Image (tube, rainbow, N blue to C red):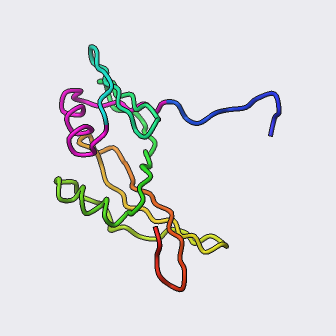
Amino acid sequence: MDPDLQLGRIGQLSRTVTDIAAARQWYADVLGLAHLYSFGDLAFFDCAGVRLFLSQGEAGPESIIYLMVDDVHAAAATLASRGVEFRNAPHMIHRHEDGTEEWMAFFNDPDSRPLALMSRQVVEGGEHQT
């Protein structure tokens, strides 16, 4: 670690969308993110202290946005009830040496760009604890 460079938490993630009005509605109504402000073909949301910046334009290579949740199964069920189609059911992707499990479930936004729910679960006595 470089003592002269202290990076903080991620301040903003950006994503290109094909229809800013439809994306603004989906990220607010389906995902439940707080809309901060919009102007022109831009919209900004709060995602637990990280700003999500959407801009209308041509699609480009995208990274997956991983959204932390306490209970991946409950969050997936809520989003499914709002019409989100998951590419797979919530599943464990890794068990750490301390027994903590990482679970994920992947889905797409209206522009077919990837997102994922992510949770860390502590396993005590063989039972999951969120």
> Horizontal and vertical percent for residue 123?
53, 76
Q: Is residue 73 above or below residue 113?
A: below
Inspect the magenta stretch and tell me whether residue 31 lies in it. yes
Which quadrant holds residue 70? bottom left
Which residue lies at the image location 31% right of the left edge and 59% below the top edge?
75
Q: Is residue 75 above or below residue 96?
A: above
Name, please, the residue furthest toward the top. Answer: 40
In this image, 103 relative to 75: left or right?
A: right
Residue 117 picture quarter: bottom left
The percent coordinates of residue 94 (x first, y second) are: 55, 69
Q: Tell me the residue at 29%/24% (across/down).
A: 56
Q: Is residue 100 left or right of residue 76?
A: right
Q: x, y percentage for residue 89? A: 32, 68
Which of the pair 121/112 is nearer the observer?
A: 121
Q: Residue furthest bottom?
A: 125
Which residue sits at x=24%, y=37%? 28
Residue at x-position 48% and y-position 30%: 12
The residue at the far right in this view is 3
Tell me how many marks there are: 0
Can you give x and y, in whole percent of width and height, for residue 51 in the image?
Answer: 43, 31
Determine which quarter of the picture holds residue 29.
top left
> Can residue 44 be found in the magenta stretch?
no
Q: Nearer the viewer, residue 119 or 61?
A: 119
- Left or right of 81? Residue 108 is right
- Placement of the N terminus among the 4 image quadrants: top right
Tell me where the magenta segment starts and ends, as one range: 12-33
